[in-house]
Amino acid sequence: MGGTGTRAFVGMGANLGNPAAQLADALDALSDAGVLAACSGVYRSAPIGPEQPPFLNLVAELVVTEGPYELLARCRALEAAAHRVRRERWGPRTLDVDVLLYGEAVLADPELVIPHPRMRERRFVLDPLAELAPELVTIGDLTAVADQECERIAAADRLRDLAAASPDT
């Protein structure tokens, strides 16, 4: 990755198909585009919402020259490449990619809210974000979500190994 740009963070999660493979494919696409700066470990978390399989989650740090809406479009393109279908709120998905932070930007409109409106309520976001940018996560944030089931299971560079060992769900 070269050049200068805006520091941004995206959260990713998957629990259908082969979640590890889908996360690895999304990271590869970000790397190929030259925007991936760093990636947290991979976390397994309990779902929020309807009964469904556990999620694999991670946070990617990006350096982008595009604006926040273009980053949102990039996230949606990653979801489309994983054949994401939006059926129900907080339902199962092949890939979910959310813009968490975009530099110091604060946006609130129907299409995009930055910082992500629920990121401080989700341990599966805060734990991996704290790996990459501990200055952005407070002890109070972590304490508030400590009861949520979430465990680090691997480094991101092990996603392909996890994918090979995991049957599709």
Image (spheres, rainbow, N blue to C red):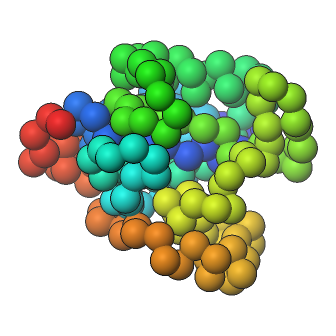
153 or 111: nearer the viewer: 111
Q: Which picture quadrant has residue 160?
A: top left
| Residue at screen point 44% across, 22% down | 87
Count of numbered circles on the image: 0
70 or 112: nearer the viewer: 112
Placement of 105 over or under 89, stated as above or below: below
| Residue at screen point 64% across, 62% down | 121
Q: Which picture quadrant has residue 112?
A: top right
For the C terminus, give its image quadrant. Answer: top left
Residue furthest toward the front? Answer: 50
Report whether residue 101 is seen.
no
Report whether residue 41 is seen.
yes
Residue 127: give x, y in percent of width and height. Answer: 53, 68
Residue 47: give x, y in percent of width and height. Answer: 40, 52
Q: Which picture quadrant has residue 69?
A: top right
Side of 13 relative to 140 (left or right): left
159 or 127: nearer the viewer: 127
Placement of 142 over or under 99, stated as above or below: below
| Residue at screen point 19% across, 50% down | 162
